[in-house]
Image (cartoon, grey):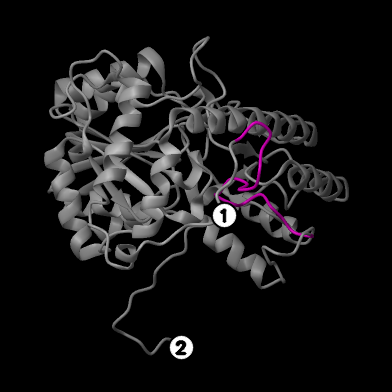
Amino acid sequence: MDDFHAFRPVPKTGVIYVTSEAYKLGFSTADPEWCNLGQGQPETGPLPGAPRRIHDVAIAADDQEYAPVAGLGELREAVAALYNRLYRKGMASQYTAENVCISGGGRAALTRAAASLGSINLGHFLPDYTAYEELLDIFKAFTSIPILLEGDRGYSFTADDLKREVLGRGLSALLMSNPCNPTGKLVAGEELERWVHVARELDCTLLLDEFYSHYVYRGRPGALPIESAARYVKDVERDPVVIFDGFTKNWRYPGWRITWALAPSSVIERFASAGSFLDGGGSKPLQRAAIPLFDDDYVEKETLAIQNAFRDKRDRMLSRLERMGVRFDRVPDGTFYAWGNVASLPAPLNDGMGFFRAGLTKKVITVPGEFFDVNPGKRRHGRASRFREYVRFSFGPSLDVVERAMTRLEELIAAS
């Protein structure tokens, strides 16, 4: 019985739910017997060809003090300069430190943005990142509008589709992960350029979660295989494009909690104001330690190492899961997730939650697809999720963990 009437029930995100359930059965991150295919972080150890990992951080005397809410000026400038070098060479409009806001984690960055939105219609996709659900519900100024993507179309959504949704639903902003967590769908190249054009033309702000933008498994010949809407922004102060990224995935330092938003400076001012009452800012010594890691050579080596290691894991995981009978609407273009349909497996494995529960008996953790049916405030009623037959498999863990998990799932299916 809950006697604390002042508090409301707060749901867990998908990753937190599945690990909480696994903890009840003895799961520990230090226990090598467990295979966590539910994890939302990449492996953080050495990779072939990657730069040396950072294990020691010096703390200067003034690092004991608060960091500025918008982040250290030197770090903000390093972020802006990297985007200019990667995506904006030769362009008249360039990002500066005033276009960057540093936060203590991706959720903090997104929360600052949500707290800064006005009374608007905000579009979001189904499926998409599980943590968006509570984020889109807790702030009451805006109204969230779901947009369903179809698996039989490979979760395609074109710039023409975007224009129709903006005009038809009166959207003033759209939130999405690109590449998408969980499907791995990537909007890139000319199509992403057209998205930015639609946003500019119709004054619809794109809120783009680009935390997996270095996990891209296709690209232009001779170019670093990364993608960002920053490449297609004409005027950094006028185009309604907000980008979120950080060290969590693309630098493989999730524990550092170094993330940023990139936007017109007037928007960044609002994010900093929101941060002043929401979170107060991030870690000062870690922000200072992060600055050298924006060096071009470091970024290129780390990105290429990620590409090679994670593409191999993706290909191995998909091949083995498909042989087990798991179906994929599309091969993921990016991220380190595989979004699989388990409907053809024997019961109870033909249901995402049933698959997850059965996997725990083999010490394998996955995430049921229903958690990605983003439903703020549970306004859409009905007991069955449209994604109940899906499972998100993470190939974020090391290759040996992925291979061991595949063998256990093969045994589980064979015994069913």
Q: Which disc is residue 55 wearing?
A: 1
Q: Nearer the viewer, mark 1 or mark 2?
A: 1
Q: Position of residue 270 (x, y in %)?
A: 14, 49
Vertical order, 392 against 25 (above or below): above
Real-space Cα separation, disc 1 to disc 2, in angstroms = 45 Å
Q: Is residue 35 magenta?
A: yes
Q: Is residue 140 visible?
A: no
Callout 2: few (<14), some (14-19), or many (20+) C-alpha neighbours within 10 Å? few
Q: Position of residue 405 (x, y in %)?
A: 77, 48
Q: Is residue 147 magenta?
A: no
Q: Name the foreground residue: 82 vs 306.
A: 82
Vertical order, 149 against 275 (above or below): above
Rendered image quadrant of residue 246: top left
In percent of the image, x 33 and y 55: which residue is there? 108
Q: Earlier in the sequence, mark 1 or mark 2?
A: 2
SS for tag 1?
loop
Does residue 171 appear left or right of residue 351 in this picture? Answer: left
**SS assignment for the magenta stretch, majority:** loop
Q: Which disc is residue 84 wearing?
A: none
Callout 1: few (<14), some (14-19), or many (20+) C-alpha neighbours within 10 Å? few
Vertical order, 314 against 143 (above or below): above
In percent of the image, x 76 and y 35: which residue is there? 325
Rendered image quadrant of residue 27: bottom right
Q: Are marks 1 and 2 in contact (CB under 8 Å)?
A: no
Vertical order, 332 against 14 (above or below): above
In percent of the image, x 14 and y 47: which residue is there? 269
Residue at numbered disc 2 = 1
Give, as a three-letter code, the residue at label 2.
Met
Q: Name the foreground residue: 5 vs 219.
A: 219
Does residue 230 appear left or right of residue 2 in this picture? Answer: left
Question: What residue span does the magenta drawing correspond to?
Answer: 33-50
